[in-house]
Image: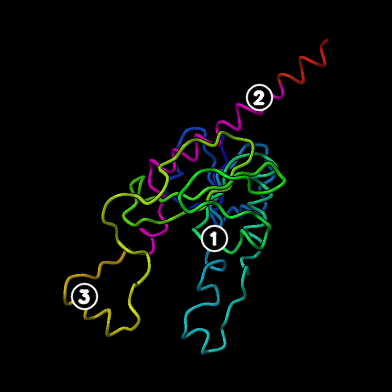
Amino acid sequence: MIAALYVERGGAYYGLHGVDPWDIDRDARKYDGPYPVVAHPPCQRWGNFYAGSPLAIKQGKRKNLGDDDGCFEAALASVRAWGGVLEHPENSRAWAHFGLNKPYRHGGWVVADWHGGWTCRVEQGAYGHRARKATWLYAVGCDVPSLAWGRAPGDFVRLDRGYHSAEERRRGVRRGGCERLSKTERAATPIPFRDLLLDMARSAVDANMTTQGDANAIGNR
């Protein structure tokens, strides 16, 4: 069994044998094992626009960096405690905040911390997303496979607006050069990438079973 934490209700992790999905109503911060996890904690308060939209800031509704109600911290603790993998956008400020080393931009796994963690950068566009969706992974206690490193080949839709003003965007629309993904499309995890993350978490299950078997064998000597 794998616990899929901070996932969309009815999304890619639902209806799968051996996967226990935790959506917003279940509150993944309360997860207490015993299964390895695939974690997608919310990222809004860890990116470049963590403070909110310009209008919200102007109205005095500015948000604080990392103000995610403890979701990332809880997800990090779950991966460290039970094994598995955590996914966040590239350049997530949570890495620096929690003392994690940044991965290389060109790819490859690097040591993330003193908790047995590994981290890397990969683009979900190489696994079927319509945007590049550059992503950082953090993994503990599981296989860290070779991935599609570097810049994914092909043409992709931008995740951000790519325009400095509303008028500039309108001109782009008139010229046929402005295509945007919906919020659901931006957040979605491509099926091949989901399966890759689940396979990594399952390798943590195998490692835990092997460790337990070795402990039992030692105890029976």
Kindly state the secondary structure of the residue where label 3 is placed: helix
Kindly state the secondary structure of the residue where label 2 is placed: helix
| Left or right: where 60 falls relative to 116 | left
Tell me the kind of residue under disc 2: Met
Kindly state the secondary structure of the residue where label 1 is placed: loop
Q: How many marks?
A: 3
Q: Is residue 49 above or below residue 17?
A: below
Label 2, on which residue? 209
Quadrant of the rendering where the N terminus is positioned: top right
Q: Is residue 195 above or below residue 65?
A: above
In the image, 166 versus 78, the foreground residue is: 166
Quarter where residue 159 is shown = bottom left
In the image, 119 versus 69, the foreground residue is: 119
Is 25 colored magenta in this rendering? no
Q: Nearer the viewer, mark 3 or mark 1?
A: 3
Label 3, on which residue? 173
Label 1, on which residue? 42
- The kind of secondary structure the magenta stretch mainly shows is helix
Tell me the kind of residue under disc 1: Pro
Provide the residue span drawn in magenta.
183-212
| Left or right: where 46 falls relative to 217 | left
Q: Residues within 10 Å of mark 2 (few under 14, many from 20)?
A: few
Quadrant of the rendering where the C terminus is positioned: top right
Answer with mark 3 or mark 1, whichever residue precedes in sequence.
1
Q: Nearer the viewer, mark 2 or mark 3?
A: 3
Tell me the kind of residue under disc 3: Val
- Cα distance, mark 2 to mark 1? 30 Å
